[in-house]
Amino acid sequence: MEKLSVLEQRVIGCLIEKQVSTPDVYPLTLNSLVNACNQKSNRDPVMSLTESEVQSVLNTLGARRLVNNVAGFNARAAKYQHRFCNTEFGELHLSSGELAIVCELLLRGPQTPGELRSRCARLHQFGDVSEVDGCLHSLMEKGPFVVKLERLPGKRESRYAHLFGDAPVAEPVTPAEITSGAGARIAELEAEVERLKARIRELESDQL
């Protein structure tokens, strides 16, 4: 499969999300899809796409057979559905858990297993983080379709990114992120020094 552009990722992610979370209004009209792309919640980054911009993306995805208009050319309003995965037209087949993870990664970018478990709840209920880990490892073996990123300083969990677009670029580490982990360690060492000083003073006083 050819790599998806940033806007193509947003459109495909929105179509997958609405297919699972609101099947009664899926496939989506152009207006509904624009609203989904521009949602302020569960989106990173937040976008302000116009109808013409989304239509242009749909035309490109349609030419690649990743989206189609199910209403037909004579219908008053086109309705779009994705053919990205789990269709008879392609080889990409994902479980409900894998699909939920891919959808969230398309919509919000790199995330930790803990974040994915929480944010995927609308699409798939994971019993615990180990189930998320299982789906992530499956996606890594299948394509690979996801990749594990290096853990940022001061962070407990590594994040995962999808590989349907350009390869993830390592994010620059900010001074705040560097010092957040180092600061805690420095505070521990300073506290230990103070305890040692106090103990030395106690020993010195006992010898007087």
Image: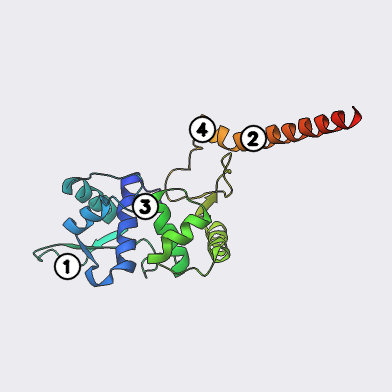
Residue sitting at x 22%, y 49%: 54
Residue tagged 2 = 187
Q: Nearer the viewer, mark 3 or mark 1?
A: 3
The answer to whether the residue labelled 4 contacts the one labelled 1, judged by CB atoms less than 8 Å apart, is: no
> How far is the residue under mark 3 from the one under mark 1?
26 Å
The answer to whether the residue labelled 4 contacts the one labelled 3, judged by CB atoms less than 8 Å apart, is: no
Which of the two labelled residues, at mark 4 and mark 1, occupies the earlier sequence position?
Answer: 1
Which of the two labelled residues, at mark 4 and mark 2, occupies the earlier sequence position?
Answer: 4
> How far is the residue under mark 4 from the one under mark 2?
15 Å
Q: Nearer the viewer, mark 4 or mark 2?
A: 2
Q: Nearer the viewer, mark 1 or mark 2?
A: 2
Quarter of the image holding residue 124? bottom left
Residue 71 numbered tag: 1
Which of the two labelled residues, at mark 3 and mark 2, occupies the earlier sequence position?
Answer: 3
Quarter of the image holding residue 188? top right
> Which amino acid, mark 2?
Ala
Residue tagged 3 = 107
* Mark 1 neighbour density, 10 Å: few (under 14) some (14–19) many (20 or more): some
Q: Nearer the viewer, residue 110 or 3?
A: 110
> Which amino acid, mark 1?
Ala
Using the image, determine if residue 20 lies above or below residue 168: below
Residue tagged 4 = 176
> Which amino acid, mark 4?
Ala
Q: Nearer the viewer, mark 4 or mark 3?
A: 4
